[in-house]
Image (tube, grey):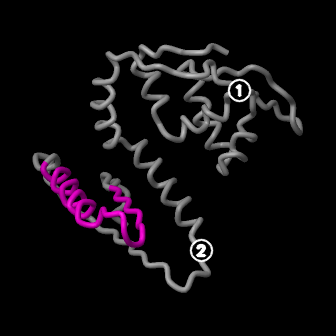
Amino acid sequence: MRDVLYLEELTQAETLLKPQRVEVLRHLAEPRTCTEVAARLEQTPQRVYYHVRQLVGAGLVEQVAERRVRGVNEGIYQAVARSYWLSPRLVGRLGLRRARDELSLGRLLDLMEEVQADVAALDRGAPELPSIGISGEIRVPPDRRAEFLRDLQGALQDLFTRYGGAEGDAFKLAVACYPKGDNDDD
């Protein structure tokens, strides 16, 4: 394992700079299987394996061994370095890509998985769970899509600003906006 890996490739930095992957990488400072990391992070092995494959593809993690468990080969992975440094030339480019990532379907899937995990962790025995669920359809002409997204972002930013203090009950807000599929007209 190297002490430092200097990242000069945008794809490597983008792969690394996701909170879930940073946590996976932190647990791979020592050789471990995806199942072992998943138990430590209280996640499914499949989810951890997905992130490990992304990290391996970016050259940030490597498979160091393999073992057979109940007739299945299980990889043992380890981070390639103890720390990672970003090239200064990447820093300005990351922000642009991150803004585009917020508009990606991959980000939407990550968000939905996060909401599902949060809801599953709620105490169903609590006397009151104040929550709201709203779903609807909005039709926006193609030439007004950017305007619509700006308006939606502005309305949400207004809520975050008005209710973003340090006092009171914490609520998590997740909004998903995506194209309605053609087969949803049933």
- Determine the secondary structure under disc 1: strand
> Any magenta on residue 183?
no
The label shown at residue 131 is none
Q: Which quadrant of the rendered structure holds the C terminus?
A: bottom left
Q: Which quadrant of the rendered structure holds the N terminus?
A: top right
Q: Which residues are magenta?
A: 147-176
Kindly identify the residue that appears in the image at 23 percent across and 65 percent down. 162
**Residue 56 left/right relative to 76:** left
**Residue 27 left/right relative to 184:** right
Bin the neighbour count of mark 2 within 10 Å (Cα to Cα): few under 14, some 14-19, many 20 and up. Answer: few
Q: Position of residue 19 (x, y in %)?
A: 49, 40
The label shown at residue 123 is 2
Measure the C-alpha gap from mark 1 to mark 2: 35 Å
Kindly identify the residue that appears in the image at 53 percent across and 66 percent down. 119
Q: Position of residue 2 (x, y in %)?
A: 63, 13
Q: Position of residue 17 (x, y in %)?
A: 45, 32
Kindly identify the residue that appears in the image at 31 percent across and 43 percent down. 103
**Residue 57 left/right relative to 174:** right
The amino acid on which the numbered mark 1 sits, given as a three-letter code, is Tyr
- Tag 1 residue: 77
Q: Nearer the viewer, residue 145 or 65?
A: 65
- Earlier sequence position, callout 1 versus callout 2: 1
- Determine the secondary structure under disc 2: loop
**Residue 114 left/right relative to 50:** left
The amino acid on which the numbered mark 2 sits, given as a three-letter code, is Asp
Q: Is residue 123 above or below residue 62?
A: below
